[in-house]
Amino acid sequence: MMIRMFLTLILLTGLLGAQQGPVDPWRTAEEITARVRLPYFPDRSFDVTSFGAKGDGRTMNSAAFRRAIDSCSRAGGGRVTVPPGEYLTGAIRLRSNVNLSLAKGAVIRFSTNPSDYLPLVLTRWEGMEVMNYSPLIYAYGDSNIAVTGEGVLDGQGSTIHWWPWKGNKEDGWKEGMPRQKEARARLMEMVEQGVPAAERIFGDGSYLRPSFFQPYHCRNVAIVGVTLRDSPMWFINPVLCTGVLVERVTVIGLGPNNDGCNPESSKDVVIRDCLFDTGDDCIAIKSGRNADGRRINVPSENIVVTGCTMKEGHGGVVLGSELSGGIRNVFVQDCIMSSPHLDRALRFKTNSVRGGVIENFYARRITVGEVREAVILVDYHYEEGDAGRFDPVMRTIVISDLTATKGRHALFVRGYARAPITGLVLTNCTFDGMEQPDVIEHVQGLRFENVRRNGRLLSAP
């Protein structure tokens, strides 16, 4: 009897521990950071110009990049080097054990001709699997891959190329021009009907814009030091990857859906010392959309964001909205977020169509200057709103040592009466210059410890 009671106590303790998150969350963040490193590459170099590449800004270099990368991989790996110059190319396919290294003064300009991103590949588009144009830089099922250096990768998205496909007049679209709306609706219908991904054939005539850098089902991935500009759509989007390092990267692009870095259904991700100035979310953690996210059912987990600066964007660090596979164990620290065109600092977004579980989110030492809407936004009413049967779950969101100087709301937090947000804790936070009262609906276990709004000490409602 005593043994049975002891085992029951152990089981209950374990369950409670899983609900409450790591005992020392920041020790967990240190462990994640320690195991995510730049992959090792053999000391071999393959200069793209030796394979016929010309940095004259006019020559199409797709074949030269392919030959250099394939040769490097067959030799057992190393660096494919890009010397100073302007190199025009279509899609680049990375292979295992290859580091694409750009020298200072090297610029890779990606073609604006959609046919240069054929043949179709398996990709995720807004969290849904599809056979579509290749991302500008793509890898599938590879390990030990990297893009490094001091050079520039230019996606050449503009109000003339790529961005008009969004269908917004402010992005260059005009009445009668092609747009993505119809294909997007058709893809979403296929997802809900369970059409196999291999049979979701899009590409030419569909106008679904490719992402910039998308390693898919890869291990040990790094992108370090480079500058990325003007993506057709999302910038950095590792999908179903393990061990991803994004370090000292500058991301600049104010186009539609120009999210900066979107880890998706990926594990052990470190985003460190980066600058984001984007037309959409700076960092958005995702795990698949609706039926596809639930079918694949792989969460994003063990993600550390540290020392980053966020300027323009819809949100600084964002969880969602495609989070049907769940998100857990996210750590954000020592970041600066400020711009009159930054809508929110910390943003959590979903609804009952997408559902998903967010648990164990920790943020500390966050400096927020100016935001346009809310410093912290947690919302179950995003886009479709409460129109589905998959109630979201958000629990254990702990934010400490955050300061903000200007915004509309300090907190804008809305759950459902039947599915409240739980475990939201704020400690040592100061919100000055807030123009309107907080919005707090359907939250359980809300705790404030030394939290001030416009000089007034707050207590949890």
Image (spheres, helix red, strand yellow):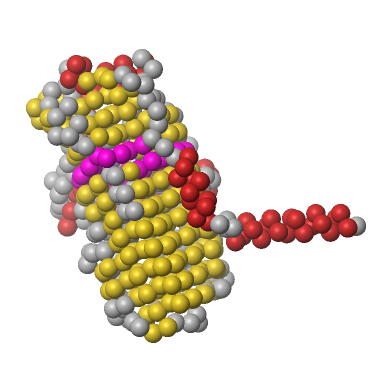
Q: Residue at x 84, y 59 (%)?
A: 5
Residue 204 magenta: no
Q: Is residue 398 left or right of residue 162?
A: right
Vertically, is 299 above or below 94?
A: below
Vertically, is 80 above or below 239?
A: above
Q: Quadrant of the N terminus?
A: bottom right
Residue 15 in which image quadrant: bottom right
**Residue in the foreground of this view, choosing between 318 and 290:** 318
| Residue 193 in view of the camera | no
| Residue 365 in view of the camera | yes
Vertically, is 120 above or below 171?
A: above
Residue 350 in which image quadrant: bottom left
Q: Residue at x 39, y 52 (%)?
A: 305
List the single residue furthest toward the bottom: 456
Please provide percent x and percent y for residue 232.
24, 44
Residues shaded magenta: 222-246
Q: Is residue 355 left or right of residue 307?
A: right
Residue 120 in which image quadrant: top left
**Residue in the foreground of this view, choosing between 191 and 308:** 308
Please provide percent x and percent y for residue 279.
24, 55
Please provide percent x and percent y for residue 149.
25, 35
Please provide percent x and percent y for residue 47.
22, 20
Residue 231 magenta: yes
Q: Residue at x 37, y 47 (%)?
A: 271
| Numbered-mark total | 0
**Residue in the foreground of this view, choosing between 299 and 193:** 299
Q: Residue at x 41, y 72 (%)?
A: 429
